[in-house]
Amino acid sequence: MKLRKRIRNPEALEDAKRLMQAGADTEIVLVFLRDRECDQADCIYAVEDLYGKRFPEAKSLVIHSKAWSDRYETDTRLREAVREAVKQLSADRSPDIPDVSIEGEDEQN
């Protein structure tokens, strides 16, 4: 499996760092990164690097930001659809499918 680069646009990250150092708030930095064609994952990694946030906090900050607000409902529906599909697959108890646990849900055994 080929993994993507953590930061795919290092020039945008460096420019975002300069913006941050000049006093721009997080929303401005996220809008800037999005305008530079960074996706949500790029922004999450950038928040980790620029602000020293851990991944869960960086992800929450990005997905709840004004900069990405137009994607929130669609992305939430997608995550829920994937979660439901994984639950259905794991309920089949096929030996070909590994055991799956979904974070934040009670185990039902």
Image: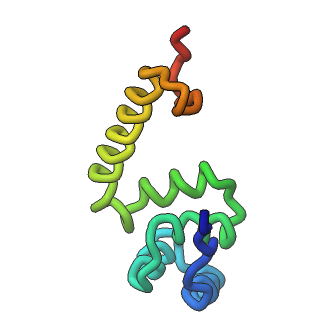
Percent from the top left, x then y, of residue 89?
Answer: 42, 30
Residue 44 vertical placement versus 89 (above, below): below
Q: Residue furthest right?
A: 52
Placement of the C terminus among the 4 image quadrants: top right
Q: Is residue 13 above or below residue 91?
A: below
**Tally of numbered tags:** 0
Q: Where is residue 12, by image quadrant?
A: bottom right
Percent x, y for residue 20? Answer: 60, 80
Residue 26 position in % (x across, y down): 52, 69
Q: Which residue corresponds to the image point at 38% horizontal and 27% vertical from the top-left?
A: 88
Horizontal side of 93 relative to 81 (left or right) equals right
Q: Quadrant of the N terminus?
A: bottom right
* Residue beneath the point at 50% across and 76% down: 29
Relative depth, front residue between 91 and 61: 91
Q: Is residue 17 left or right of residue 63?
A: right
Image coloring type: rainbow
- Say whether residue 87 is visible: yes
Q: Position of residue 54 (x, y in %)?
A: 68, 54
Q: Nearer the viewer, residue 20 or 75?
A: 75
Residue furthest out toward the top: 109
- Whether residue 23 is visible: no
For the point 47% across and 79% down, the residue is 33
- Which residue: 57% across, 80% down? 8
Does residue 45 appear left or right of residue 97 in this picture?
A: right
